[in-house]
Image (cartoon, rainbow, N blue to C red):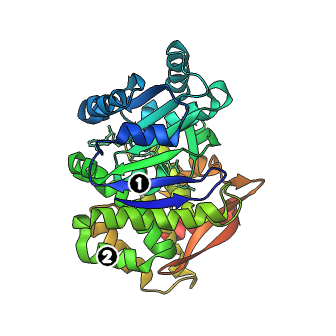
């Protein structure tokens, strides 16, 4: 096992294992000492694969266990699923000593985390991420949210988990496209701050070393989160590729996944940055080469004018300006504030 400590308003461990450890229940108890009940949240696909085993481990540790299963997919990350979860928690009489366990990808983690942040004004929760995206990004750092009809992640809270338990063998059952989605976030760390990680993916493609990549990304993320837990400075850099990415997800009515949106978003801002001389001229080709090798898209299916309404609904706007994350070199990015017209022009340059 390897372990990374996340230092935020709550300090907690990310434990990286090959498979679900026999003592998973004891680890949950150690992370949330007063808990008598564990409420496991999962989507239908993940529950069928991993739910009963997890439930057994929790029961073996003496916890009373409940579970709630919702339909998989981004379309579930909404207010009505969120309310269902709160009502389920209250029916199970989960109290402030108890624990919610989010077993699944980023959708489950975001929904479960937001429910944990708000139920009884906050209960403990544990993330057991089962997608690459969730292991390397969404389970760490305490951002929780649901989508509103007006935009992605518009209602949420910062609420840190008490433990993150990554079991890399869960990646074996992931469809290849979903593994590739997670790779978009791994490439993001490479461009932002970790040239060695970028080169590892260039060498190994989708056959990357699982535990090595997960641990490296978690360490990279810990660095941003410990410096800026509440997203007022350095952490904003983690939004590389996300402004356009979120707009594409919404325009496609979520047929385009988060990872694919981020992949296109990173390729577009990198082309636009190179066009303006803000990053080396060869960076876009190198980035696109890697994204394509990972079976990720690099071109927007829609012209920028058809994405405008979604770009302007992004939660990163402050007054009439939005901060766009722009690569400066492999392993270094900067923040460029833009107004509406500049943003559209910049994105159009990147879409040429
Ligand atoms: P997801 O949770 O929908 O999982 C993708 C699909 O994989 C689902 O259909 C799920 O059922 C299936 N799945 C999950 N684990 C599996 C496994 N081991 N084997 C087989 N199938 C499995 O989506 P995701 O890509 O994990 O996460 C995307 C979400 O994460 C988006 O909503 C995004 O906004 C959010 N996100 C949040 C943060 C954050 O910091 N909170 C960061 C990045 C992304
Ligand atoms: N995924 C962006 C963040 O955690 O800040």
Q: Using residue 301 as the reference point, say whether residue 171 is left or right of it.
A: left
Q: Is residue 273 visible?
A: yes
| N-term mark: 1 or 2 | 1
The part of the image, by quadrant, that contains residue 70 is: top left
Furthest residue toward right = 319
Residue at point 53% right, 65% down? 348
Residue marked by disc 2 = 200
Where residue 43 appears, as percent x and y from the top left, is 36, 31
Say few, some or many: other residues with alpha carbon within 10 Å of mark 2 (under 14 / 14 to 19 / 20 or more): some
The part of the image, by quadrant, that contains residue 254 is: top left
**Viewer-proximal residue among 118 and 198:** 118
Vertical placement of 325 versus 124: above or below?
below
**Secondary structure found at label 1:** strand
Residue at point 27% right, 67% down? 209
Q: Quadrant for ligand 1?
A: top left
Residue marked by disc 1 = 15
State which quarter of the image contains the N terminus.
bottom left
Mark 1 CB near ligand 1 (8 Å cut): no
Where residue 199 appears, as percent x and y from the top left, is 34, 79
Vertical placement of 262 versus 149: above or below?
below
**Secondary structure found at label 2:** helix
Q: Using residue 330 as the reference point, say whether residue 289 is left or right of it.
A: left
From the image, state whether disc 1 or disc 2 is nearer to you: 1
Residue at point 65% right, 48% down? 315
Q: Using residue 124 as the reference point, say whether residue 219 is left or right of it.
A: left
**Viewer-proximal residue among 2 and 107:** 2
């Amino acid at each position: 096992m390897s372990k990374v400590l996340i230092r935020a308003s709550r300090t907690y461990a990310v434990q990286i294992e090959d498979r679900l450890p026999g003592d998973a229940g004891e680890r949950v108890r150690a992370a949330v000492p007063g808990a008598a009940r564990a409420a496991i949240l999962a989507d239908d696909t993940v529950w069928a694969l991993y739910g009963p085993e997890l439930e057994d481990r929790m029961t073996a540790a003496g916890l009373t266990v409940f579970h709630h299963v919702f339909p998989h997919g981004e379309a579930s990350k909404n207010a009505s699923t969120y309310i269902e979860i709160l009502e389920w928690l209250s029916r199970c009489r989960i109290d402030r000593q108890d624990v919610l366990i989010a077993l699944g990808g980023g959708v489950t983690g975001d929904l479960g985390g937001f429910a944990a942040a708000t139920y009884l004004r906050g209960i403990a929760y544990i993330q057991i991420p089962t997608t690459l995206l969730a292991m390397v990004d969404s389970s760490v750092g305490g951002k929780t949210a649901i989508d509103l009809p007006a935009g992605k992640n518009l209602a949420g809270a910062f609420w840190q988990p008490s433990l993150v338990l990554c079991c890399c063998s869960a990646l074996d059952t992931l469809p290849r496209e979903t593994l590739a989605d997670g790779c978009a976030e791994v490439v993001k760390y490479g461009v932002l701050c970790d040239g060695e990680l970028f080169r590892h993916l260039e060498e190994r493609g989708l056959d990357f070393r699982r535990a090595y990549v997960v641990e490296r990304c978690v360490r990279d993320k810990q660095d941003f989160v410990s410096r800026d837990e509440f997203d007022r400075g350095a952490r904003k850099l983690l939004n590389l590729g996300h402004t356009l990415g979120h707009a594409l997800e919404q325009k496609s009515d979520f047929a385009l996944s988060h990872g694919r949106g981020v992949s296109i978003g990173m390729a577009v801002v990198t082309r636009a940055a190179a066009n303006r001389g803000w990053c080396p001229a060869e960076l876009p080709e190198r980035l696109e080469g890697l994204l394509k090798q990972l079976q990720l898209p690099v071109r927007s299916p829609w012209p920028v004018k058809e994405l405008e309404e979604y770009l302007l609904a992004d939660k990163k706007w402050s007054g009439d300006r939005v901060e766009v994350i722009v690569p400066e070199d492999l392993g270094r990015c900067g923040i460029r504030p833009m107004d509406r017209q500049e943003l559209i022009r910049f994105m159009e340059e990147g879409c040429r």
